Image (spheres, helix red, strand yellow):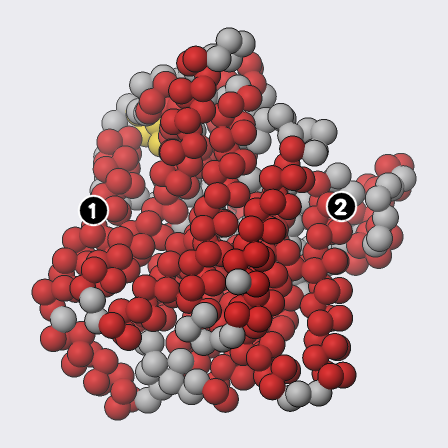
Amino acid sequence: MKSKLVVFLFTFISIYIFFNREDWKQNIYEYDVDGYYTYLPALFLYHDLGKMGFHHQAHIDFGVTEDTYYIYDQPLTGRRTNMYAIGTSLFELPFFLVAWAWSDHVDGYNPDGYSTPFQIAGHFSNIFWVMLGLFVLRRFLKAYFTDTVTALVLVCIALGTNLYTYTIFSAGMSHPYVFFILACMLYYTQRWYAQGKPAQLYMLGMLAGLAVITRPIAIIAFLIPLLWEVNSVQLLRLRFAFLAKQGKNIAIAALFFLAVAMIQMSYWKYTAGHWVFFSYQHDGFTFLRPKIWDGLFSYRKGWFVYTPMALLGMAGLFFLWKKHKTLAPAFILYFMIIIYVVFSWRNWWYGGGFSARGMIDSLSVMALPLGMFIEWIISLKRKLATTAMLVVCTAFITLNMFQSYQYALWILHCERMTKTFYWKIFGKTKINNAEVDRYLMSEHDYNEEVKDRFDNK
C-alpha cells in the first residue's frame, strides 16, 4: 500500500507543480521536443508528413524552433526527413487526440497543434507514462522486496533523480517514455521466466520494437532478458538450448518487433528512400574517444554529480551479486555497456538539459540494485545505519528537487556549467547576471567542443 501511495503522491506533486508554475502555458515544443512531436500535427492536422512545410509558419506563429537543423531535404525522394525517432509521438498520440477534440469544440482555440490544449497534452502525456512506468516498476520490485523497501526505491527514483526534472520541468523528451518501456521489459522478463506464457514473450518483442523507434540505444537493455539468471558458461548453453525450443514463440515475438519497427522504417522509406537510415546527419558515436569520466563526474553534466542517487544504485550492484548471483551479471553488463555507449556520443553532454539525461532510461534498471542496497541496510537491524541511509536519501532527494528548481529558473545553466559556477550558485534562488558569463566560460573550452562535434562528422 505504501508503494502505491508513493506513485499517487508523485503524480499529485507533478500536476500541482505544473499548474502552479507561472509559465505553465508556455510553448514546450522547442528543439528536440518539437522534433519528437512534430509527426503528429504533420500527419493529422496538416497532412504533410513528407515535407512538413507547415513548420516554418508554426515557428512564426507559436515560437517553435526553426526546423533547419533537424528536418532536412532528401535529394533521392524530394521529401524531407525528421531526424528524431518517431516513438515518442506514439506515446503522445492519445493526449494529442484529446487536445485536438478539445480545440475543435471549445471557443478560442484552433486545431493547430500548438495552442494551449496541445501544450497541456504534452505535459500530461509525460506525467501519465511516468506514473504508469512507476506502477509497472512497483509490480516488478514487489517480486523481490517488501512493500516498504519498494516504496523507498520508488521515492528515491521518482523524486531523487532527473526523472523528476524531465517529468515536470522538461516535458516531451524521449527519456521518460523509455523509462516506461524498460520498466515493462523487467516486469515481463521476470514473469516470462517464472510462468512461461507465450503472451509475455510477445510483449517483450513489442517492447523491443518500441524501444528501437523511441530511442534506438535502449535496445541494449534487452540483453537482460537474454541473460536473465545466467552467470556461467553452462547456464548460457542451457539458455540457448531453452530458447531453441521456443523457436515458434520467438518467431512470433520477432514479428511483433518487426511490426512496430516498421512504423519508423516505413517513414524512412517514404522520406529518405531507405528502409534503414541513419538520420542524425551531424552527430554520431566516437567509440574510440568515450567521455565516461566527464559523463559521470564532470560539473558540466556528471550523472553522479547532479544525480548522486545513482551512486547508491551502482553500489547496489554489489549487493545484487551477493544475494542473486545469477541475476547480477546481466545488470552489471548492461550498465557497463550503456555507460560506454551513452558517453561515446559525440555530443556527450546531450545539449541543454539537467544532469546526464542519457541515463534517465536506465533508472528502471537501476531500481533492482538500489533496492538491494536499501534492503541490505535495513537487514543490518541497526537503527543508526538505517537512520543514516534515510538521511542520505533525503538529502539526495532534496538536492535533486532544489537543483531541478534552479534549472527551471535558468540559474543552473542547461549546458555550460563549471565547477566554479556550480559552487557560486549552490543553494541560491537568485544570481547576479553580470557575473554569469565569466563563470560559465572559465573552466572548459565549450566553443571548441561544439566545433569538434561538427568538424568530425
- Image x and y of residue 319, in percent: 54, 84
- Image x and y of residue 402, in percent: 75, 51
Graded by Cα atoms within 10 Å as few (under 14), some (14 to 19) or many (20 or more), the crowding at tag 2 reads some
Label 1 and label 2: CA atoms lie apart by 43 Å
- Image x and y of residue 230, in percent: 33, 83
- Residue 177, placed above or below residue 184: above
Q: Secondary structure at mark 2?
A: helix
For badge 1, the amino acid type reads Ala
Q: Residue at x 25, y 46 (%)?
A: 260
Q: How many numbered circles are shown?
A: 2
Answer left or right for 408 relative to 179: right
- Residue 103, placed above or below residue 169: above
Residue 288 in sight in this render: no
Q: Residue at x 46, y 16 (%)?
A: 103
For badge 2, the amino acid type reads Gln
Q: Quadrant of residue 356?
A: bottom right
Foreground residue among 404 and 415: 404
- Residue 170, placed above or below residue 181: above
Foreground residue among 306 and 336: 306
Q: Which residue is mark 2?
A: 406
Q: State if disc 2 and disc 1 touch (CB < 8 Å).
A: no
Q: Quadrant of residue 27?
A: top right
Q: Which residue is mark 1?
A: 259
- Mark 1 or 2 closer to N-term? 1
Question: Among all residues in the image, which is located at the extreme front?
Answer: 1
Q: Residue at x 43, y 32 (%)?
A: 95
Q: Residue at x 33, y 76 (%)?
A: 228
- Image x and y of residue 34, in percent: 49, 32
Residue 409 in sight in this render: yes
- Residue 99, placed above or below residue 155: above
